[in-house]
Image (cartoon, rainbow, N blue to C red):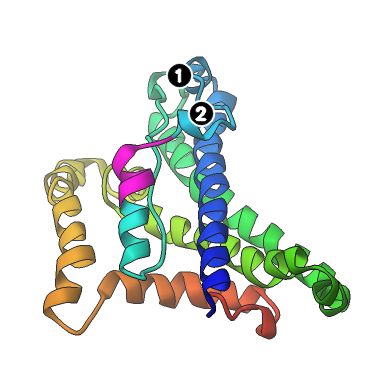
Amino acid sequence: MSNSQVIAYYICAIISFIPAIVFHEIAHGYAAYKMGDPTAKQAGRLSVNPLRHIDPFGTVILPLLLMVLNAPIFGYAKPVPYNPAYFKDKRKGDLIVGFAGPAANLAMTVIAALICWALLPVANTLASSSIIFAYFYYMFLPLFAFTNMCLLFFNILPIPPLDGSSIYIYLIPKNKIHVYYQIERYAMPIFMLLLLVIPYILPINPIGAYMNFFAGNLTRLMFPPAIASPI
């Protein structure tokens, strides 16, 4: 890619990441609110203002580090506060709140793909007359979808504070939950080892392979073949 294309790529990547994490977090808070918990709303976490959702490491440092390493860009925002005491069924409430964020990312991916398919008949014509449309259609839409899918598959990992830690616990028998909690506290150090250390020691990148296999392939399936090249 030329220098201008590289700059456009990073701009599109950043613009993709911000709404992906914001609506992910809003979905968590809104799900809790609909089940009777006003905690997220009172904390101002149903806002579209990105500053209310930023986590210094998960939202800024980790994505920038992955960008420098030329790895799939993903991360997480500051966890939305909620109080399961408001839920009629606490375990079911935790599951719904945990699932709401990844579901929002899936919905945004589907919307991006539908826009891409809807504009497909006129895309070449519009792109030839507008460089902004060309970048929007051929670069931003697939990157936006891929970023959302990366956030989806990243957040469903059973690692606190990620959503998977509240999703999978619903499937564990109550008498085994204490075992899950004992294992869970080692999950983040192991994840960071797989993400940042193993690729430099061995010729494998397990997290990158996981993201590319699930997030990359599923995103490509949703888009016209000729549009999926930036993924």
- Residue highlighted by disc 2: 32
| Precedes in sequence: disc 1 or disc 2 | 2
Amino acid type shown at disc 1? Tyr
Cα–Cα span, label 1 and label 2: 9 Å
Q: Is residue 44 above or below residue 63?
A: above
- Name the one closer to the observer, 47 or 186: 47
Query: Which range is magenta?
Result: 54-61
Residue at position x 77%, y 65% from top? 133
Is residue 156 or residue 171 the one in the foreground?
A: 156
Look at the magenta stretch and give its main secondary structure: helix
- Pointers 1 and 2 in contact (C-beta within 8 Å): yes
2 over 159 or under it: above or below: below
* Residue 100 visible to the viewer: no
Residue beneath disc 1: 86
Report if residue 93 lies within the magenta region: no
Type of amino acid under label 2: Ala
How crowded is the residue under tag 2: few (<14 C-alpha within 10 Å), some, or many (20+)?
many
Q: Is residue 221 above or below residue 84?
A: below
Which structural element holds mark 2? helix
Image location of residue 152, percent across then percent down: 47, 56
